[in-house]
Image (cartoon, coloured by chain):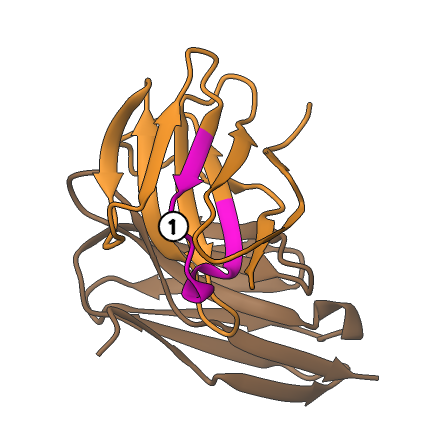
Chain colours: A brown, B orange
Amino acid sequence: KNEVEQSPQNLTAQEGEFITINCSYSVGISALHWLQQHPGGGIVSLFMLSSGKKKHGRLIATINIQEKHSSLHITASHPRDSAVYICAVRTQGGSEKLVFGKGTKLTVNP
Amino acid sequence: DAGVTQSPTHLIKTRGQHVTLRCSPISGHKSVSWYQQVLGQGPQFIFQYYEKEERGRGNFPDRFSARQFPNYSSELNVNALLLGDSALYLCASSSALTSGSYEQYFGPGTRLTVT
């Protein structure tokens, strides 16, 4: 079992829909990241969370440390939101490496 | 201000050869991490360097090595290339080693194809 699990693996939505991507993890963490990866590979950091909730534009990220679960929400989705969304956790201690989920491929159709 | 840069962008090598990938962190960042992303998978941690010292190593064979230079740029070396080494290699930099609040900034990656 992977230390970081994301669901769903693939998600197709119509423009304007509300989208939720989930992330569960099984290790102790110091922070959780939500990342966006477009075709071609470049990764952009969307959020870094250690507790509570963060909002940036149409994106909202929440984390429940007790339940070891985080969600990324996109309101009023747009075709330009189409990308792979990756959850990554920074493990406690040592080098504090990032452990990544496999990603959720989001396609938003016009 | 320039972001994290990586070179080359793309690379094709033959089995058995070696390869050197390069990364320049954001100015002022002292920590560099390397990740391997095989097609369809999430990135996997390879190394972290901070202040020119290795601070973390992932589950990769000894064919993989890295170093960090006084200007905090870094090289990732892979010897005796295998077909399975074909992947996108990502470099990320951050300003601190152990802090709950630092961000990692990713470069565009180097796509390595081994034939």
Residue B68 on image: x %, y %: 39, 23
Residue A12 on image: x %, y %: 65, 88
Q: How many marks?
A: 1
Q: Nearer the viewer, residue B31 or A25?
A: B31
- Quadrant of res B69: top left
Name the side, left or right, on which A9 lies relative to A24.
right
Residue A3 on image: x %, y %: 24, 69
**Residue carrying label 1:** B80
- Quadrant of res B36: bottom left
Q: Is residue A87 above or below residue A82?
A: above
- Quadrant of res A17: bottom right
User: Residue drawn at (53%, 32%), measured in percent from left and top?
Assistant: B23
Residue A61 visible in the picture: yes
Which chain contains the residue that carries disc 1?
A: B
Which residue sits furthest right? A110
Q: Nearer the viewer, residue A104 or B54?
A: B54
Q: Which residues are magenta?
A: B75-90
Give the position of the N terminus of chain B as an image quadrant.
Answer: top right
Residue B87 is inside the magenta segment:
yes
User: Residue drawn at (18%, 47%), measured in percent from left and top?
Assistant: A92
Which residue sits furthest top? B70
What is the three-letter code of the residue carrying label 1? Ala
Check disc 1 and report its element: helix, strand or loop. loop
Q: Nearer the viewer, residue A18 or A34?
A: A34
Q: Is residue B36 above or below residue B92?
A: below
